[in-house]
Image (cartoon, helix red, strand yellow):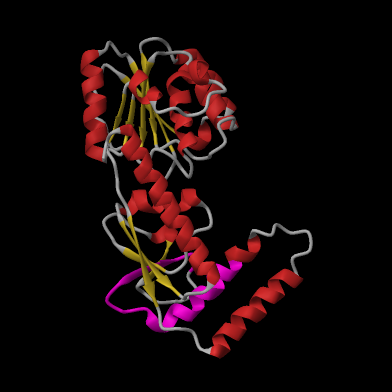
């Protein structure tokens, strides 16, 4: 079964219901270190083991788990969509575990990382052989035990006053410097660095009564946090978007934020990242609409 968008208590309840309706002797819960499952209310007669996502591929876990996972074992995958590559080694190792038992619960806060086809990663956990080589189709949602609780996001552009000519010139010189020094490096490094550079123009407009989040701690202000410092229940204004979509998705999972507010310089690089965020939100809403869970 696949459950999308659930909170911690809802996940706990799903596991408890599953255990009461199936004869389960062992539970293995897989999770990335930043998204551990809460303590589970499981009878003492059932063996329970929590395994970090990074350990799925480790020899000391892999062969032992292949020996002990059997048809009376429940596998729980909590927020384990960590790459868009369906052929990732960690996924492939997990599929070997999945082949040992038909009892699987796959929890994911969002249905995809960046593209709708990422949902196939969850379906592969459910039944790799059935979906191997197939692209996503909405009819699969009806064919499997899939339930989705949607999370709808808004994106707001908070524009600072127009930059002065001297700041625009600074930005242009920085861009030229990055292009001149590119050489054989990845050209994607240019927008990454320019986005952070553009963020420096926003410092005078950081308000002391609001929380902000940036890619690094260069501002040295108590109300500007890095993405790694974000906490549940807190709401932040975005100074710099992370370059990786997964990092921003993790931030949304951790904080529970659904209103994305971006402090924008008006420069093209900021407009690019803002546009990417809006496009992602549109794809997400379209998925929910097509899935019939608006």
- Side (left or right) of 271 relative to 133: left
In the depicted structure, whether residue 202 falls above or below residue 84: below
- Residue at the location (57% across, 90% down)? 166
Comparing 251 with 182, the one in front is: 182
In the depicted structure, whether residue 233 falls above or below residue 147: below
- Side (left or right) of 166 relative to 81: right
Task: Identify the residue at the far right of this view.
Answer: 183
User: Which corner quadrant of the image does residue 182 belong to?
Assistant: bottom right
Residue 46, position as x, y percentages in the image: 29, 18
Q: Is residue 214 magenta?
A: yes
- Side (left or right) of 242 relative to 28: right
Q: Is residue 268 visible?
A: yes
In the depicted structure, whether residue 163 falls above or below residue 278: below
Q: Quadrant for the N terminus, please.
A: top left
Q: Which residues are magenta?
A: 193-216
Q: Is residue 99 magenta?
A: no
In the depicted structure, whether residue 260 falls above or below residue 72: below
Residue 178, position as x, y percentages in the image: 69, 71
- Residue at the location (61% across, 85% down)? 169
């Amino acid at each position: 079964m696949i459950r999308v968008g659930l909170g911690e208590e809802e996940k706990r309840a799903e596991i408890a219901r599953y255990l009461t309706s199936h004869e389960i002797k062992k539970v293995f819960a897989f999770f990335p270190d930043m998204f551990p499952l809460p303590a589970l209310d499981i009878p003492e007669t059932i063996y329970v083991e929590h395994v970090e996502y990074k350990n799925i591929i480790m020899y000391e876990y892999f062969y032992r788990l292949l020996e002990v996972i059997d048809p009376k074992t429940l596998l729980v995958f909590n927020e384990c969509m960590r790459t868009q590559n369906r052929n990732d080694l960690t996924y492939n190792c997990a599929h070997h575990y999945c082949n040992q038992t038909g009892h699987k619960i796959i929890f994911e806060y969002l249905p995809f990382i960046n593209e709708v086809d990422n949902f196939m990663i969850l379906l592969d956990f459910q039944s790799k052989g059935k979906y191997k080589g197939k692209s996503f189709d909405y009819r699969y949602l009806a064919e499997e035990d899939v339930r989705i609780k949607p999370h709808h996001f808004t994106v707001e552009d908070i524009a600072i006053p127009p930059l002065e000519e001297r700041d625009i010139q600074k930005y242009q010189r920085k861009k030229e410097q990055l292009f001149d020094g590119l050489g054989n490096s990845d050209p994607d490094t240019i927008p990454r660095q320019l986005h952070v550079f553009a963020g420096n123009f926003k410092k005078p407009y950081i308000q002391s009564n609001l929380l902000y989040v940036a890619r690094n701690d260069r501002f040295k202000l108590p109300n500007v946090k890095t993405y790694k410092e974000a906490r549940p229940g807190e709401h932040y204004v975005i100074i710099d978007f992370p370059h990786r979509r997964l990092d921003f998705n993790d931030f949304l999972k951790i904080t529970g934020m659904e209103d994305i507010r971006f402090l924008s310089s008006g420069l093209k690089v900021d407009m690019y990242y803002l546009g990417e965020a809006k496009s992602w939100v549109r794809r997400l809403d379209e998925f929910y609409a097509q899935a019939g869970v608006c």
